[in-house]
């Protein structure tokens, strides 16, 4: 039996790809034993058990960028995390460790390489994350989703795999009628999906509020606006009885696959997972990168698409001023939308999860002697 640790998390952008990789490992080798390692108090501690996997939590946290006494506690938690990581490695005895990014990948990845256990990294973004850059020298494989990643990692270690996405999304291209019905939309109208993720995005919401009256006058267009739980009650109260008939305001999207299926144009942040989903579903997209992420990596993700004519990008500080004009232009120019969908479709990789899982299993098989059992 092969034993594999999958580590990382902190956000859905790390957790869902990690689960996709784990599920692919199970499909390729049903007997594989998988243990997740995450950060205590983060969403993986809930999402991973819901998906049927065991998880151990480390008390690791990120260093504050400013000089602060909190960093003393962060360093103490790092020391505790390294101790716990050594116990996990000793007791689980893995054949390989997979790091998908996030704070928890650091301690377990470091301890694994010290013990001579192969480390495979998955880098989702076009600009490498801090944890993966720190671990890269000791990793034996680095699975990437963008070209040009040799500027961060040794070229000989790179494998171009793309980013895994949730399997339910792969059916969305054929589910437009179901998506329209699920969200109570009009099948005769074009649909714009505006989504800032489960928590919402303040900039996208402000831009929508600014232009709601104009949007209400758009002919043959409807908007599915997911504002996030943090903003929903305030927006609902503010627009009670005044929300245009062609706009549906929701806190959450219970079926993201059906929301995508219904959409003709998507307005979203530029996280790596979102971009991979848009590529697979061949959606015309307006990307508004979040400025509140490490190394401004969302701008770099979006730029990689814009340079190939596969998306439109708006800076966060331009969204309120320009979003309505950009959307109106796209809605009035179906040829431009079609070109965006054609170009973004060229960037899709459809079996990323199994490609990554295959690389992990190959590393283990090459390391193990024939007939050796654990």
Image (cartoon, rainbow, N blue to C red):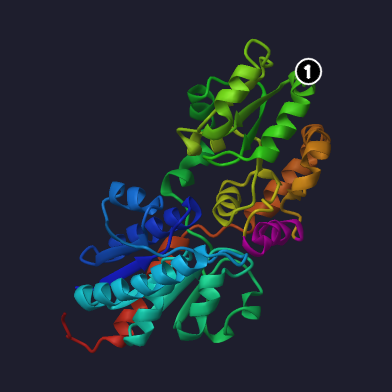
State the residue at coordinates (41%, 60%).
Answer: 18
State the residue at coordinates (43%, 55%).
Answer: 15
The answer to whether any part of residue 187 appears in the image is no
Q: Assign the C terminus to one quadrant of the image.
A: bottom left
In the rendered structure, does residue 311 fall within the stretch colored magenta? Answer: no
The answer to whether any part of residue 52 appears in the image is yes
106 up-or-down from 222: above or below: below
Q: Element at badge 1?
A: loop
Per the image, the residue denoted by label 1 is 217
- Find the magenta span and give its range: 294-307
Q: Nearer the viewer, residue 305 or 236?
A: 236
Q: Residue 174 at what x, y percent from top left?
A: 51, 37
271 on left or right of 99: right
Q: Residue 239 at what x, y percent from top left?
A: 65, 17
The quarter holding residue 98 reads bottom left
Q: Residue 220 at what x, y percent from top left?
A: 72, 21
Badge 1, how many Cα within 10 Å: few under 14, some, many 20+?
A: few
Q: Residue 251 at what x, y percent from top left?
A: 53, 29
In the rendered structure, does residue 304 fall within the stretch colored magenta? Answer: yes
State the residue at coordinates (62%, 30%).
Answer: 225
Q: Main secondary structure of the magenta part?
A: helix
State the residue at coordinates (22%, 73%).
Answer: 92
Q: Residue furthest top?
A: 241
Q: Assign the N terminus to one quadrant of the image.
A: bottom left
170 up-or-down from 192: above or below: below
């Amino acid at each position: 039996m092969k034993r594999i640790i999958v580590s990382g998390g902190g956000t859905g952008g790390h957790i869902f790809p990690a689960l996709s990789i784990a599920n692919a490992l199970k499909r390729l080798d049903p007997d594989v034993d998988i243990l997740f390692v995450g950060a205590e108090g983060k969403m993986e501690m809930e999402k991973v058990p819901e998906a049927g996997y065991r998880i151990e939590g480390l008390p690791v946290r990120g260093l504050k960028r400013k000089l602060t006494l909190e960093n003393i506690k962060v360093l103490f938690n790092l020391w505790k995390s390294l101790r716990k990581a050594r116990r996990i490695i000793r007791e689980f005895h893995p054949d390989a460790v997979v790091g998908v990014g996030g704070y928890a990948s650091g301690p377990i990845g470091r301890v694994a390489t010290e013990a001579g256990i192969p480390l495979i990294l998955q880098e989702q973004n076009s600009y490498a994350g801090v944890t993966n850059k720190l671990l890269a020298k000791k990793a034996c494989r680095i699975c990437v989703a963008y070209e040009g990643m040799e500027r961060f990692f040794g070229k000989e270690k790179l494998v171009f795999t793309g980013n895994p996405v949730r399997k339910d999304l792969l059916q969305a291209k054929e589910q437009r009628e179901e998506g329209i019905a699920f969200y109570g939309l009009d099948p005769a109208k074009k649909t714009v999906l505006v989504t800032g993720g489960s928590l919402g995005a303040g900039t996208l919401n402000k831009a929508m509020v600014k232009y709601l009256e104009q949007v209400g006058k758009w002919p043959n267009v409807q908007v599915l606006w997911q504002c996030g739980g943090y903003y929903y009650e305030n927006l609902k109260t503010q627009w009670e009885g005044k929300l245009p008939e062609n706009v549906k305001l929701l806190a959450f999207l219970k079926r993201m696959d059906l929301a995508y299926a219904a959409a003709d144009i998507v307005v979203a942040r530029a996280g790596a997972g979102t971009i991979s989903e848009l590529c697979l579903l061949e959606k015309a997209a307006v990307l508004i990168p979040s400025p509140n992420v490490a190394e401004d990596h969302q701008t770099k993700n979006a730029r990689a698409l814009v340079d190939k004519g596969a998306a439109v990008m708006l800076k966060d500080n331009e969204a309120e001023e320009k979003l309505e004009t950009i959307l109106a232009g796209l809605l009035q120019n179906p040829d431009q939308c079609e070109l965006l969908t054609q170009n973004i479709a060229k960037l899709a990789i459809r079996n990323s999860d199994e490609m990554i899982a295959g690389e992990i299993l190959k590393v283990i098989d090459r390391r193990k002697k024939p007939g050796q059992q654990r």
